[in-house]
Amino acid sequence: MGVLEVIEYTKIEFLVACASSHVRDGENVFGGTGMPLLAALLAKETHAPRANLISEAGFIDARPRNVPLSVADSRYYFGCSAAIGLIETLGFILQGGMIDVGFLGAAQIDEYGNLNTSYIGPYDNPKVKLPGSGGGNDIASSAKRLIVMMTHDKRKFVKKLDYMTSPGHLEGLGSREKWSMVGGGPEVVITDICQMDFDIETRKIRLMSIHPGYSVDDVLDNVMFDLIVPDKIPTTREPSKDQIEIMHKLDPNGIYLGKGG
Amino acid sequence: MTEPEVEDKRIDIAEAAKKVNNGATLAWGGFGFQRAPIAFSHELVRQGVKDLTITTCGSEVDIEIMAGSGVASRFEIAFAAIEALGLSYVMRRRVADGAVQVEDYTNLAMAMRFLGGALNVPFMPLRSMMGTDMARLSRYRGDDKLKVIDCPFTGEKICLVPSLQPDFSIVHVQRVDKNGNAQIDGIVGEDIELSRCGKKLIVLAEELIDEEEVRFRPDQTKIPAMYVDHVVVLPYIAHPMMCHDYYDYDLEHLMMFHKMTSTEEGWREYLNDYILGVDDHHAYLNLVGWERLNSLRATKPWGY
């Protein structure tokens, strides 16, 4: 037995590695930009080489050699198998039920995994206009599985959203079915301190695993709703040295990972 | 067969901008960082055009410019931010002070609205937005933002969005012949549908090519001349954004823009220096500097 190696990582590296573990080989994945894109690329470089990375701007089976800054960035172009358009990706592919996994971030999330990426403050007099849906609501409505990635902050895990941009499990079990949604809704919420999934009976958010160095109280102190806490809570697997090395090769200038690390 | 003479639809960008009346509705092409008609947004500012309604999926620097200058006061869009850099500061301030109203749709919803307009049908169905505030809340469109109905065939819930047939469609492409046959390299985003839905279509292109070249590779024509009313040919139309196979984005300028627009004073300074302070697009390019612009030239096979 060797000496136990201590691996150092940043919160972002942990989030990316953790998210990549949810991409399975051969799946059709909406990558976008930022941390989700790095997660999808990392998955392709490690356990899911046949994952089909799609950008909503129209790139299919993309293998960018430099990290794109925009979903429409030409860095997505070379090596992809088809460069088409938005009706293709969001219409035929996504609404057609062919996207296995999509990723979204959010400014606010509620206990059913519904997301706000539009407004902080009242709709009629918003304090902050956020980016809006983009393809987010389309993805949340129609991707088979949705992975939500966000940094953990009490103000983001709210009882009531200022605005519901994208559907999670709406009001709970059966409510997505009422709107004949194509996709299954959020499966996992990954933050920099824990992973959460959704209770099968109620579709309410539930603690799934805690990242090393954090406690249940750290999680509970940082949510404004009643989080379901199971009796046994595993520790989230740390990123491997390989994973961290690979993600820095994918983002050598630290555009998304930051300069450090 | 004799060669028929074709119409030369070329006009300069100032003439093109003058055709847009105050209060008109525009379908705005480009997607994300790709093929944004930035030069046309500059010219609309210079011509003093006001109170437009801009309809698009997701534009970034150009909608900041149009929101900040008063060129546009209404937006029917899915997304406003500068991807990878952060929030759209100008849009955020204009929405907060009520100068700009945003009617929120999704990317697919906007693409479907353009498709519906192009198909000349009044609405299109889609499976997004239902169950959320996007379907519950609206601004100036009121009940005409969308409708959620029970499908008359299956009974399931379906969302209907109104088609768009705006006064103008504005599309930026790589190449065009003088008659308007337009070629797009790389992804098309929503520009196929968007270019067909407007009452008038203005195509802005980086390069003028011969009709012969079009007819030699007709599969490259993404917008046939029959749809096109006016053609504007200029280099670096999308700067500081990108144009596939022609030039990369100018990250330094983009970061400067984003930083300056974080305050109203900074935005005013940018507006005065780079848009109102120059006579035309060529003067803007001179100000940016040709050394910089040349360094952005795309290389093969990458396209950026």
Image (tube, grey):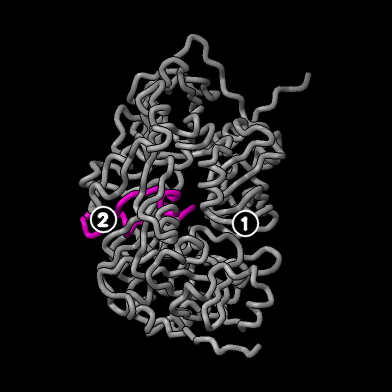
- In the rendered image, which quarter is residue A117 located in? top left
Residue drawn at point x = 49 percent, y = 29 percent: A184
Relative to A86, A26 lies left or right: right
* Chain identity of mark 1: A
Q: Position of residue B3 (x, y in %)?
A: 62, 89
Q: Amino acid at mark 1?
A: Ala
Tell whether B37 sits left or right of B293. left
Instruction: Tell me where residue B198 appears, x and y as whole percent.
Output: 39, 67
B139 over A210 or under it: above or below: below
Percent x, y of residue A99: 57, 38
Please name the residue that numbered disc 1 is placed on.
Answer: A83
Do the residues at pointers 2 and 1 share their chain? no
Which residue is label 2 attached to?
B101
Give the structural element (helix, strand or loop) at label 2.
strand
Q: Residue at the spot x=38%, y=83% of the render?
A: B14
Give the residues drawn in magenta, as a range: B83-111
**Does dot 1 land on a helix, a strand or a loop?**
strand
Nearest the eye: B275 or B289: B275
Residue B222 relative to residue A125: left or right: right
Q: Residues within 10 Å of mark 2 (few under 14, many from 20)?
A: many
Q: From the top left corner, tell me how far across and down residue B246 is, in percent.
A: 60, 71
